[in-house]
Amino acid sequence: MKKRLFSLTSLALAAALMLTACGGGAGTAGTGQQAGDSAAKGGAKTLTVAQAADAVTLDPQKTNDTASANPMQQIYNTLIDLTPDMQLKPALAEEWKQVDDYTWEFKLRKGVKFHNGEELKASDVKFTYDRLLDPKTSATPAFLLASVKEVKVVDDYTVQLVTKEKFAPILYNLTHIGTAILNEKAVKETGDNYGVNPVGTGPFKFVKWDKSSQIVLEQNKDYFEGPAKLDAITFRIIPEAATSVAELRTGGVDVVLDLPPQQVKQFDNSDKVTVDKAPSFALKYLGFDQRQKPFDNVKVRQAVNYAIDKEALVKGAYQGIANVSTGPLAPGINGFNENLKGYEYNPEKAKELLKEAGYPNGFKTTLYLSDKEIDSKLGTIIQSQLKEVGINVNLQVIEWGAFLAETAKGLPMYLLSWTTVTGDADNGMYALFHSKNQGQAGNRTFYANEEVDKLLDTGRTESDPATRVQAYQKAQEIIYNDAVWAFLTTGQSIVARNKRVHGFVNMPTQNYKFYPVSVE
């Protein structure tokens, strides 16, 4: 049985060593000690989790953002999953094998039930992937399985994926929440409203979603691995970090996801709160719509890179709990190019490039930000730094869901993050830089480079690990020289939790799964 294409264990360890140094209105789902005490009422074990932005949808095929993924990780399962050290492990598929160069076969677990009582069958897998790949769906994560030509049902518990060409990252792509298995009956019954009526096989079932306030889930007693240790989870939407921290202190929430670095030190000697810091495959970048002037000029994009002091961003916005990004991938990801050293801070070089590009006096532009607190801090610092080279920046803040929609259409300059949740360069590059994926899929810079396309295609179709790595490293070099982004920072996943919360695993992919979590 061929269960792996290459090993990521050593790379994940390398990431750990290298990076250790690295919505809507406020939630209303109970506050203060009253909410904290609710976990113990009647013996029930409820976990309350704070996150800064609301979900866009709970349909995994209609979005590709972290705020939506957090609750969806609890509701759904994929065919394959990842262990904390980035090894593949069975999920809905008990086993799999490669039949030939173009065919993968998956044996499903028997007796798995969807939340509506339907048994998982191979027909659900076929329905899910056919829907994902149907252009009418306009599925944001369709790029994950773009090489799949046909989904075949062999029998009720056996399904085959037939690809158009050799497809090296397929197993890792099948761990992505965008490939989560849906129930055909549930999707067809709810139609356009499925995103607010999700039905999965996961350890928690959907109860309700109060927009901009909370998403409530309850234990799935029929979960195939056994019931979770928690009876319920509430995701509270709290954009303000100070409010989240106050709620954590008073028991209004048990966990704060993506705790801003400036909030970390206050818990250094806390007897009630633990802060988990782990290497992350996430990076923050400044994107440019290359169809719009002046960002259609590579010298302008390079000038912006030279004009930004990334070390100042690390110190000012991240309190030192981050690293300077050297290129389009984070360290530890399979295919990372360690030879790229990043654009140095050189304002004079930036001015020189602007002059060569025809902007000797600089220009005016708008930098679009989401309503996340960290983006506001970064935007303010970047605005000040760019002004020093003659680029006058207006900051425009947009609510998270609307922000994603606008970047897909095209914004001149914007701040965004990307987490390579599979640990493989394909997930960190194909969606973002292949010309096929301009717009919604991930290439929001509308970048197009034939050589990069060929290299990324090679990375997908070449089975030899060394050849794949070579292709990705060369592509990174071109993307770096083209200054597709202003490469800013790679960070850490910072999660604060009450010490009575046990079993939480902080993975570099930032796939937060609460199935193993318990509350005293």
Image (spheres, rainbow, N blue to C red):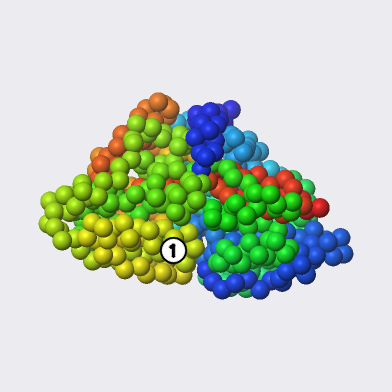
Camera-side residue of 268 and 26 = 268
Res 384 → quadrant:
bottom left
Q: Position of residue 462 (x, y in %)?
A: 38, 31
Residue occupying the point 79% across, 62% down: 39
**Which residue is found at the position 36% from the left and 42% from the top?**
327
Q: Is residue 116 visible?
A: no
- The local secondary structure at tag 1 comes to helix
Q: How many marks?
A: 1
Considering depth in this image, is 370 or 199 the residue closer to the camera? 370
Q: Residue at x 49, y 63 (%)?
A: 372
User: Residue, x 62% and y 55% (percent of image)?
Assistant: 266
Number of other residues with Cα within 10 Å of mark 1, as a class: few under 14, some 14 to 19, many 20 or more? some
Image height check: is 7 above or below 134?
Answer: above
Side (left or right) of 443 relative to 131:
left
Image quarter (top left, top right, bottom left or bottom right) of the N terminus:
top right
Name the residue type under label 1.
Ser
Residue 138 in the image: above or below residue 340: below
Q: Position of residue 161 (x, y in %)?
A: 50, 42
State the residue lying farthest toward the right: 42
Q: Position of residue 28 (x, y in %)?
A: 66, 73
- Nearer to us in this view, 417 or 251: 251
The image quarter containing residue 105 is top right
Residue carrying label 1? 376
Residue 28 visible in the picture: yes
Query: Residue 373: percent from the left, percent from the top?
Result: 49, 63
Q: Nearer the viewer, residue 445 or 382?
A: 382
